[in-house]
Each structure stands twice: as structure tokens, then as C-alpha cells.
Image (cartoon, rainbow, N blue to C red):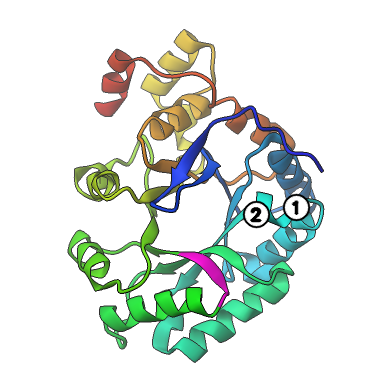
Amino acid sequence: MAIQSNHKFKVLGNAKEKIPVIGIGTKGIYDYRLAEEALIHAFNLGLTLVEVSEAYGDGLAEELIGRVIKRFKRDEIYVVLRVNAVRFSSLETVIKAINGSLQRLNLAYVDIVVADGLNEIVGLSTQVKILESLIDKGVTRYIGLANLKLKDLSSSIQMLSKYNIDVIQYKYSVLDKRVEKDILKFSIENNITFLACSPLEKGAVLKNSRLIYLSSKYKKTPIQVALNYLISKSTVVPTPKAERKAHIDEIYGALGWNLNVEDMRYLEKI
């Protein structure tokens, strides 16, 4: 299928490749048939970054993505695979886990592997070395980290020997701005793409009075305002879950316009 190219992109970390401003998450899907239709629609609109983990639906989310990707050109899709830190007990262990994901995804490789958290048994430096080895093994093109404290995140960057950390992944929304104190700043200073999990707070953004007010002002929905706030940050790419085509259309409507400075400050007070 042909993919539209009239939407905005951001640069992936230091890789100089362009990725969509908004990605699609696949955690917590209830209806996989509708989600498949929604993901096809998202890819057709150019929302071609999708985030998944073997833990999402016990592999069903990976199988869903595998079915959808067959309809498109592989090099037009960015697959982000989130791998729990417990898998990083050895290179062999994590390769085995990723190969299981690749089988369900029906892919030869993913675009980005993100190590989620720290393995209490394996030291941080060993985990970073294993991450780099995944690129050498050809199972991923880029690597990332998730949910580390700032000191560990900073240390990991210094431990790299061959490649860059091009992605970090944390919970971030207009209602939960804890990462703005330090992690987001680190992301911007080091030119690392920030994948924002749970950007819609399971629908809680729909009930916030400030978002409701601005949605009326801009003739947008609270969801679109909430996402627009995030994508205004230079490195941030939110990954909301969507399992209906109408959800995809609403997400897509967060693109192509900007909150003004005054209204950004208004939302910063939430």
C-alpha cells in the first residue's frame, strides 16, 4: 500500500533518519480485529512507528503487527521492541527472546530494541554491551533504554563503545510531567528521541478542564490538545494506544497545527 507523506516527521536520535511525530502503542488491546484495521489505517496515514513487547497480550500484539506489516514495504515501518531487563542476563538469553518476538512479528529484524529497566544481577555496563551486540547480530538497527534513573541513564551513555542510544522511553503526559524536571532535558541536550508512554492517561485527559477549554478554543478534542502539547517538545514522540480507526483519525488530528506560547504555559500549570 502507498503511504501518505504529507505529515510531520522528527529525526530519530543521532541516526539522521526521519520517524513519525506520533507512533502507535499496542499495550492493552481488547479487540484485535478492530486493532488490525486501525493499525492498517494508521500506516496508510503515515503513522508508521509502532511500539510492542512480548508481554503485550502474551505475544498477540506482535502477531497483529506481523499481519499488518505484510501489507506494506518493510523499510517504511519502524518497529520498536521493548524488552524487559530480566532478559539481559546474557546475550544468548536476550537473543532467544528477541528471536521469539521476530517469529511472531514475521520479521528478520526490528528497528529499535529498548531495554526496559535494569537487571539487578547483570551490571549496567554489561547490559549496555549486550545492547550494542544486538546491532552487531543484526536483530535491531538501533538501541534504546527505558525507565532508568537519570544517573544510570547518564552513565549508560558514557559506557557505549560503538553505537548511540537513540531512544529513551518513559511515561509522560500533559497530566504527568515528572520527566520534565530532568529526563526530558537530558533527552533534548543529548539529541535522544523520547518515546512517551501513556500520553492519554487511559482517557483521563478527556476530563481535564484546561484541556477541555483549549479544545473549544482550537476546535480540537482534548486528546488532540494533549498530544499536541507533547509533540511541541523537540525530541518527544508519543505512542498512544489505538484500536479503532476513529481513534487513529483523532490522533492524526493532533498534527498540522500548534498551541501558542501562552496556551503551552497554561498547560504547564496542570
Residue 139 is a magenta residue: yes
- Towards the viewer: 60 or 205: 60
The amino acid type of the residue labelled 2 equals Ile
- Towards the viewer: 145 or 213: 145
Instruction: Tell us which disc is closer to us: 1 or 2.
Output: 1
- Towards the viewer: 51 or 127: 127
Q: Which residue is mark 1?
A: 73
Q: Which residue is mark 2?
A: 29
Q: Quadrant of the N terminus?
A: top right
Using the rendered image of the protein, determine whether residue 244 is visible from the camera's viewpoint: no
Looking at the picture, does residue 96 appear above or below residue 215? below
Residue 181 is a magenta residue: no
- Towards the viewer: 208 or 46: 46
The amino acid type of the residue labelled 1 equals Lys
**In x, y percent, where is residue 17?**
51, 48
Q: Which residues are magenta?
A: 138-142
At 53% across and 11% down in the image, what residue appears? 219
Q: Is residue 199 left or right of residue 267?
A: right
Looking at the picture, does residue 270 appear above or below residue 82? above
At 37% across and 45% down in the image, what residue appears? 172
What main secondary structure does the magenta stretch of the protein show?
A: strand
Q: Is residue 152 left or right of residue 11?
A: left
**In x, y percent, where is residue 270?**
28, 29
